[in-house]
């Protein structure tokens, strides 16, 4: 019974995170790890995330643009794997550094989302930046468990259509999730017990994603994005202060 409050809290977190993902196409790992890090080590939160993120991103990555996106994005996607493996020691090492880095990543992401700076990459700049973007994105994923920076802004600068962008985000998140799960397993953090907890987190995440899809037509997306990114900025600042102070 002593674990029931934490289990209920985690279920509500994944319900909320899934709802956000269903509403705007991203945010599940960001919210799940960011909020769960308030009550548990970031590495444990990341282990709970693996199966819900895997399932929801398989759904999001599926679609008619899959092959063209793979042909275009494979250098960036490929580099997510070694980057994640290289950065996992900071996440699994525990201590305040992991929490502080997680907070910084969330705060930077929240600030970027609020500013929404418009920029576009030329084909040449896209080719040159693909490998370093994937490597840096993997390092951030491994170090914090949050796979958004700098991959999300980079994808947003490619001039993709709305549907193709959502699918590209799902594809990048899917590769990052597989890399994170592999890195956690190699580090001994994705244990059978953690896998069981991650499996229990799957239903609320899927339910939240379905709810978010239903709410998409009822909440102005621009308003929700402002609330979402402002909340991430505040949460990230709080975690960074706790971890780095």
Image (cartoon, helix red, strand yellow):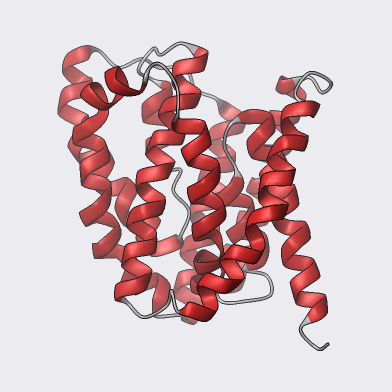
Q: Residue at x 32, y 64 (%)?
A: 182
Viewer-side residue, 92 vs 218 = 218
Q: Compared with residue 158, is residue 176 higher up or lower down, i.e. above or below?
A: below
Where, quadrant-wise, is the C terminus in this rendering? bottom right
Q: Residue at x 45, y 73 (%)?
A: 97
Inspect this view and state whether residue 29 appears: yes
Task: Judge left or right: residue 179 versus residue 230.
Answer: left
Inspect this view and state whether residue 231 appears: no
Q: Compared with residue 34, is residue 16 higher up or lower down, i.e. above or below?
A: above
Tell me where residue 52 appears, x and y as whole percent: 57, 53
Q: Residue at x 50, y 25 (%)?
A: 166
Q: Compared with residue 177, is residue 20 higher up or lower down, i.e. above or below?
A: above
Task: Examine the image and state in which quarter residue 125 appears.
Answer: top left
Outermost residue toward the bottom in this view: 2
Viewer-side residue, 113 vs 145 = 145
Tell me where residue 17 appears, x and y as whole percent: 68, 48
Q: Residue at x 43, y 42 (%)?
A: 173
Tell me where residue 108 appears, x and y as whole percent: 51, 45
Task: Judge left or right: residue 188 versus residue 113.
Answer: left
Viewer-side residue, 204 vs 172 = 204
Q: Compared with residue 77, is residue 36 higher up or lower down, i.e. above or below?
A: below
Tell me where residue 37 appears, x and y as whole percent: 62, 68
């Amino acid at each position: 019974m002593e674990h029931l409050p934490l289990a209920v809290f985690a279920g509500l977190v994944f319900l909320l995170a899934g709802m956000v993902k269903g509403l705007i196409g991203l945010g599940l790992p960001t919210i799940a790890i960011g909020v769960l890090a308030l009550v548990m080590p970031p590495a444990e939160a990341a282990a709970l995330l693996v199966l819900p993120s895997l399932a929801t991103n398989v759904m999001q990555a599926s679609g008619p643009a899959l092959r063209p996106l793979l042909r275009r994005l494979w250098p960036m996607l490929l580099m997510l794997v070694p980057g994640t493996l290289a950065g996992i020691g900071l996440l699994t090492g525990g201590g305040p550094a992991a929490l502080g880095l997680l907070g910084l990543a969330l705060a930077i992401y929240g600030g970027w989302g609020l500013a929404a700076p418009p920029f576009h990459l030329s084909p040449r700049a896209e080719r040159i930046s693909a490998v370093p973007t994937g490597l840096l994105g993997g390092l951030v994923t491994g170090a914090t468990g949050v796979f958004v920076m700098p991959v999300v802004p980079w994808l947003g600068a490619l001039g993709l259509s709305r549907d193709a962008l959502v699918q590209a985000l799902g594809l990048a998140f899917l590769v990052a999730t597989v890399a994170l799960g592999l890195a956690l397993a190699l580090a001994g953090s994705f244990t059978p017990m953690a896998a069981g907890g991650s499996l229990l987190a799957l239903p609320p995440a899927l339910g939240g994603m379905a709810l978010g899809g239903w709410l998409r037509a009822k909440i102005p997306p621009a308003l929700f994005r402002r609330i979402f990114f402002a909340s991430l900025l505040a949460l990230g600042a709080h975690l960074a202060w706790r971890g780095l102070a």
